[in-house]
Image (cartoon, rainbow, N blue to C red):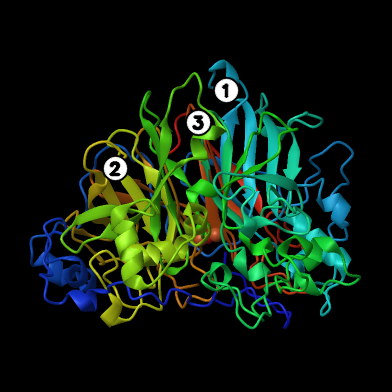
Amino acid sequence: MHTPQSTSFIDLTADEPLSNTSGNAHFSDLLATRISRRRLLGGGGALAAALTIPGLLSACSTRPMPAQSGLLGFDAIPALALDTITVPAGYTTQTLLPWGTPLLPGAATFKADASNTAAEQAQQIGSHHDGMHFFPIDFAAGGNSSTEGLLVMNHEYCDPDLLHTGGAQGLPRPLAQVEKELAAHGISVAHIRLDNNGQWQLVSGSRFNRRITGSTVMEMAGPLRGHASMKTLFSPDGSAARGTLNNCSMGVTPWGTYLTCEENWSDCFINRDAVIPRSQYRYGIRADNSKYHWHTAQPQADISQRFDATATADSAAQDYRNEPHQFGWIVEIDPFNPASTPRKHTAMGRFAHEGIIFHPAVEGQPLVAYSGDDSRFEYIYKFVSREPYFRASAGSHLLEQGTLYVAVFHDDGRGEWRALDIHNAEFQQRAAGAGVTFADQADVLLNTRLAADVAGATKMDRPEWGAVHPHTGEVYFTLTNNDKRRADQTDAANPRAHNQYGHIIRWREQGAPQAQNFEWDVFWFGGPAGTAQPQHQTLATTASEIACPDGLRFDADGRLWIQTDISNSSALLGSPEFGHNGMYAADPHSGELRRFLSGPNGCEVTGVVSTPDQTTLFVNIQHPGEGSTPTHFTSQWPDGGKTRPRSATVAIRRINGGKIGA
Ligand code: FEO
Ligand code: CA
């Protein structure tokens, strides 16, 4: 998410404070080591990345175009700057479930002037659609319906200037606006069905339709449940929480639940204490770094005051000093049980979770999943369940105990996972060496970023989505950009200073997925046509120039779908070679990459999932019209005319009924 705001007291464009001040090695510390690397062909990461002049690589007998593998069966579209969705010839699109769509029984219709109340918003589809998944309606029976299912999606944030008639009212914030903003966040579960005309329809009145918001009651699970650091006025025993916020990407468990990931939650809070605890400061919480100023709401209310974490009472159970500890988790939701209470899983670590991606479960083996911490210079993590997976007994308990690891990318193409485990001798030694103490494993998890600092993790260029290749088990991760990385801070895995284009890294575990060592290389360097792709011995073309990769998903055939988020604050926004944000498909084996979709004005393209038969691909269009003011809309997508822009889902189908992308 990256949003501009015209309203002076709300600044959603502000970067979070750079909070990783650890001394973990940058490449400058490793100058004595060799730069050339076995896995980065043709000169090595830092050198190859600098080669954006076609002639240089041509001279090295690099072929200008990748081989045709047959995995990609569509004609690339050009870079475009239209206020509409464009897909290749032979494809159609349908817009569904825009922000404000009535979802629950009796829900109010969407009012074009945005005058729906908070209570009405809580029964409608939320705003700023992000990660999502399609659960076949017959999942529990082992089925794989591609014509009916539950579409579950995140609503990452809201733009107060578009959410309210006349925009955001300023300080102190009116409680009614704050309540509506909380209601626009969260998750929607929408029961949808394909009709005889090939159009997806919401099943109105379905018992599965559900909204979860920034105020929904949740339970804590795992090592932090009941911990002293979780006690609040709302939950004096530290077992419950209210709401999930800034849900970016997601994951899906083998037992059919949805995992939603809390990303940029920290700037919903302030803390005016003289000393802000490390469990908040290391996450960017400051005295004056609130994006929505919810804590100022008048009249005062418990639901909004909790965003001020300043200690005001004699004990933690009497104020909200610990409220920020209830965010930064992965939250499990059972879409097939509308009465279920969402569970915040603390064993999987606390940070700015972009998403969570599982290796396919193997009977009798532990579950393995990855999650990136999307902030500049943060890390990539891996969770390995303590208990083995068995289909017959699999469930939420598998996520409550396990080992959290953090990635170290060595400059020679090897990598290792280092355990963040207070009982691990190496971790103990590193913590002692750093002069850092943890009271217990719950304290380690509460302070995941600090624990990873201690472990010597590699500082990455904003880890976003991950995806596991369905055939090879290779793991791909987008590193969307990092314009703050200096030349003396580059390393082999993040080889470009002022990395405005981003890249996609990949690794292969050495042995089983739970292995502690891996080999890695860079799958793709973002950049304009001519950018060297040393791993494929080729160059980016006008069809494959890409910037700021973010959303990522493999389909069952091994096609890699890549979505982009060039932010409004990027100098690349509006440049003709990249056009609007969009979606690309890649063949990981051949290195082919082609632009498939271009989005409307000001949007980010995110959220990607297909039906099991791959004949519908759902994507989300987030924040069309970014940069709008309350009186001037820079996009009219999707409703046209003079309407305000609305985030929405797009269902892509082929005219011939075939697989998308094939
Ligand atoms: Fe919410 Fe990292 O994008
Ligand atoms: Ca994202």
Look at the picture and state if 557 lies above or below 317.
Answer: above
Disc 3 crowd, CA 10 A, few/some/many (<14, 14-19, 20+)? many
- Residue to which mark 1 is pinned: 139
Looking at the image, residue 6 sits to the left or right of residue 447; the answer is right
Look at the image and tell me whether residue 273 can be seen. yes
Image quarter in which the N terminus is found: bottom right
Percent across and percent down for residue 638 are: 68, 54
Looking at the image, residue 404 sits to the left or right of residue 176; the answer is left
Which mark is on residue 474?
A: 2
What residue is shown at x 26% (from left), y 60% (from top)?
Answer: 409
Image quadrant where residue 659 sits: top left
Image quadrant where residue 7 sits: bottom right
For marks 2 and 3, give the CA distance.
25 Å
Mark 1 touches mark 3? (CB < 8 Å) = no
Look at the picture and state if 442 lies above or below 80.
Answer: above
Amino acid type, residue under disc 3 in the picture: Thr
Percent across and percent down for residue 135 are: 58, 31
Q: Earlier in the sequence, mark 2 or mark 1?
A: 1
Q: Nearer the viewer, residue 437 or 188?
A: 437
In front: label 2 or label 3? 2
Q: Earlier in the sequence, mark 1 or mark 3?
A: 1
Look at the picture and state if 106 lies above or below 371.
Answer: above
* Label 2: element kind: loop
- Residue to which mark 3 is pinned: 615
